[in-house]
Amino acid sequence: MATILVIDDSKLMAHVAKGILNRCDHEVLLASDGESGIDIALSRKPDLILLDLIMPGIDGYQVCERIKSNKSTAEIPIIIVTSKAGPADKVRGLEIGASDYIGKPFDEGELVARVNTHLRIKELYENLQVKNRQLQELANKDGLTGLYNHRFFQDAVHRDFQKAVRYHENISCVMFDIDHFKNFNDTYGHQTGDMVLRTLGNVIARIMRDTDLSARYGGEEFALLLYHTDHKDVHVFGERLRAAIEEKEFKKDDLVLRVTISVGVATYPHDEISDASKLIECADKALYRAKESGRNRVVVY
Ligand SMILES: [Mg+2]
C-alpha cells in the first residue's frame, strides 16, 4: 500500500482517480489547487503524485518545479495527468522533472499500470540508496575492530583540522599502540591477537564520545581525533584510556590476558603544528617517547 497525492481542480477527476487507487489498496490524499498540493506534499511526503496541469492559481508546471526543487520532496515521482497532451507539453513536463504523462480522460488499466511502475522504480531506487550507504559504511570501516580505517581517518584529519583553524577551535590527536604486541602474537598466536584488537575496539568505542573519531591506524596502532579538546583534557582522556586498557581482562578459552598501551597526544593550537600532517606527526613523536621512556604511559607533545 502506498500513499498517493492527487492534485486536481476537477472534483470529478480527482474522485475517479481516488476510487481506482483505493481499489488497489492505496491511500489517496486530495488537493484541489497547487498551493495546497505543495503543502500536503511537504507535510505528508506521499510515495507518488498525480498532477493536473491546468488549475486556477499556480499551474501544474510550477507545482512540479517547486516540488522538484525542494530537497525533501524532490525524489517523489510525479505523473502529470492532463488533456493538454501535445508533444511540446509532454517534453516540458518531463524536462522539469515529471516521471511520466497520462492523458485525460484516462483509462483505469493504464493509470494503475503507470502508478505501479513508478512506485516500483521508487522502491528500487530507495533500496539502492540504502545499499549504497551500507557499502560506503563498509568501505570506511576496519573489518576487525569496527572502527574507522586509516584512509577515512586521514581524510577526516585533513578536513577537520582546517575547520579547527578557521573557527579557532582546539583539536587533539591521540596515537597509541599495544606494548610488545609482536611478542604477544608470537606467544599466543594471531587469532588471540585478533581477539585482543577486536576487544580493544569495543573498549575504545565505549570510552569515546560519539562526536569524536576513532580509527585503527595500522596493525596494532590506533588513532583518535578529539574535537574541542585542549591539551589538558586530552591528557586526562589519554590517561583514562591507558588505565581502562591496563585493567581490561582479555579472555580466550581458559587464558586471561592483559595488555598495556603507550599513548602519544598532540593538540592544535601549538607553535609547531601548522597542518593536519604535523598534528599526526607530533602525536606519533609523543608516542615514540612514551615507548622510549618505558611504555604503558601517556606523553603529551
Ligand atoms: Mg484542471
Image (cartoon, helix red, strand yellow):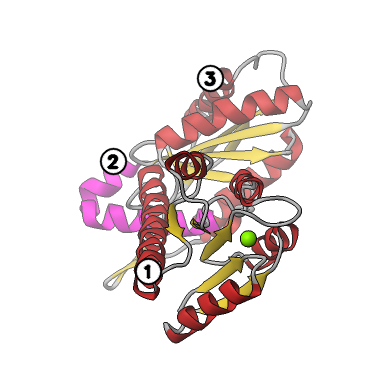
Q: Which mark is residue 116?
A: 1
**What residue is shown at x 53% (from left), y 73% (from top)?**
3
Label 1 vs 3, first from the N-terminus? 1
Label 1 vs 2, first from the N-terminus? 1
Give the labeled residue for mark 2. 182
- 38 displayed left or right of 64: right
- Of the four image quadrants, the one with ligand 1 is bottom right
Q: Nearer the viewer, mark 1 or mark 2?
A: 1
Type of amino acid under label 3? Ser
Q: Are marks 1 and 3 in contact (CB under 8 Å)?
A: no
What residue span does the magenta drawing correspond to? 180-205
Q: Residue 24 in the image: x percent, y percent?
A: 42, 82
- Tell me the SS state at disc 2: helix
Label 2 vs 3, first from the N-terminus? 2
- Tell me the SS state at disc 1: helix
Q: Residue 247 in the image: x percent, y percent?
A: 52, 60
**What residue is shown at x 56% (from left), y 44% (from top)?**
213
Magenta segment: does it hold 187? yes
- 252 displayed left or right of 293: left
